Amino acid sequence: MADDAFAATAAPARARFRLPAAVRGLIRFASLIAAVSVVTFALVALSPIDPVKMSVGQATYANMSAEKREQLRVYWDVDTPVAVRYARWAEAAVHGDFGTSLRFNRPVTAVIAERAGVSLLLMTTAWVISGAVGFALGIAAGTLRGSWVDRLIKGYCFLISSTPTFWLGLVALIVFSVWLGWFPLGFSAPIGQAAAAATLADRLHHLALPALVLSLTGIAGVALHTREKVIDVLGSEYVWFAQARGEGRHSVLLRHGLRNLALPAITLHLAQVSEIFGGSILVEQVFSYPGLGQAAVTAGIGGDAPLLVGIALVSAVIVFAGNALADVILGLVDPRVREVGHGAR
C-alpha cells in the first residue's frame, strides 16, 4: 500500500516535468539538420559520379596525367572515406564553415547567399499566388456545388495535379515567350546585363512567368481541400440555423464559416512549402533561373557534396520555418489553438 501511494504521488510529479516548447523545438530542429546532412553525404557517396571528372570535363580529364589526377583527387578528398569527410565537414560547419563548392570554386555560404534571395522571391511569390487563388477557387466551387463553375474548377485541379511541373514550364515558354513574346525566355535579368544592374521592372518581368507556373500545382491542392470544407460548413447545423433566421448563403459563409475555412487552408498551404521548394528546382532549370534549385542540380550532377549539403540544409530550414509559421498563424486566426497548445504543455 505504501508503494502504491508513493507511485501515485510520484506520477504527477514526473508528468509535470516537461521541457519547454522552445527547447523541444530546438532539439527537433537540431535533429532534423543532423539527419539531413548525414543522408545527403551518404547519397553523394553512393553516387557513381566522379566529381573530378565532372568538374574538369571529360576531354580535359582524358588528357590529364595520372599525377595530376591524383593531386585533384587528394585536393577534393575524393578517396577519403565518407565518414571521415563528414566528420571534418561537421566540425567546420559548427564554426560556420560549410566548405568550398567544387563546381563554383567559392565558399558554399557565398554561393547560397547569392542565390537564396532569387529563389526565395520566386517561391514566396508562387506560394502567395497559389494560396490566394486556390482559396478563392475552393470557396467558389463549394458554394456553387454541382454547377458548371464547380465542374470547371474541379477539372482544372485534376488536370493540373496530374501534369508534371517541368512540362507546364516548357508549354508556358513556348506559348508566352516564343509565340506571343510577352515574357523573356529565362534568366532573372536581361541577357548581357549584370543581375545587380537590373531594374525592379526587369526582375519582375523575368519573375512573372516562372512564378505563375510554379503556383499552378499548389492552387489545385488548396482549391480542392477548401471546396470540401465549404461543403461541410454549408451543411452544418449552425449554418442552417443562420439561414432560417433569414441570412443569405454568402453572408453566412462570410460571417460564420470563414474562420473554419481558413484554418485547414492555412495548415495545408503552409505544409506545401516543401512542394514549392521541390517544384522550384524544376522550374528554375526550365527557365534558367539562377536560384538554389539550379545550383542544386549543378551540384548533384557534379558530385559537389559541400554545396549539395548546404542547399539541403537551407531547404530543411525553410520547411521547418514553414511549419513553425503555421503554428503562429493558426494561433492568431483562432485563439483556441493557442489555448489547446498551452493546455497540452
Image (cartoon, rainbow, N blue to C red):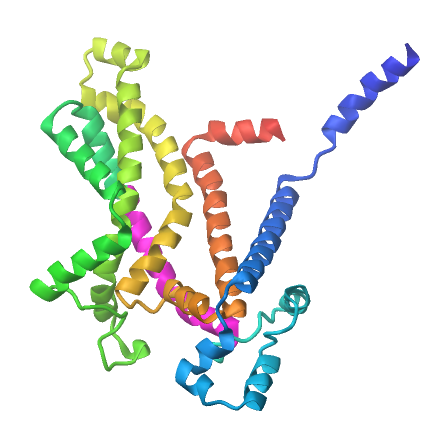
46, 309: nearer the viewer? 46
The residue shown at (73%, 28%) is 16
| Residue 323 drawn at (x, y percent) | 48, 43
Estimate the x, y position of residue 174 in percent, counting from the top left.
14, 61
Along the line of sight, the residue nearer the viewer: 22 or 282: 282
Inspect this view and state whether residue 174 appears.
yes
User: How many numbered discs?
Assistant: 0
At 30% from the left and 37% from the top, the residue drawn is 222
Q: Tell whether position 121 is magenta.
A: yes
Residue 248 position within the rendered picture, expressed as x and y whole percent measured from the top left? 18, 18
Depth order, front residue of 43/217: 43
Nearer to the camera, 282 or 337: 282
Locate residue 204 relative to residue 183 in the image: left or right: right
Q: In this view, does 302 lie to the left or right of 143?
A: right
Judged left or right of residue 112, residue 281 is left
The image quarter in which residue 72 lies: bottom right
Hey, which quadrant is residue 15 in on the image?
top right
Residue at 58%, 80% (x, y): give it. 73
Q: Residue at (62%, 40%) from the top-left corner?
A: 21
Is the residue 155 above or below the residue 64 in the image? above
Q: In this view, does 214 lie above or below 47?
A: above
Q: Quadrant of the C terminus?
A: top right
Overall secondary structure of the magenta stretch?
Answer: helix
Name the residue at the left extreme.
180
Q: In this view, does 257 lie to the left or right of 74?
A: left
Q: Assess whether residue 115 is covered by the magenta stretch.
A: yes
Q: What stretch is highlighted in magenta?
A: 107-131
Residue 145 image position (x, y, % from top left):
18, 23
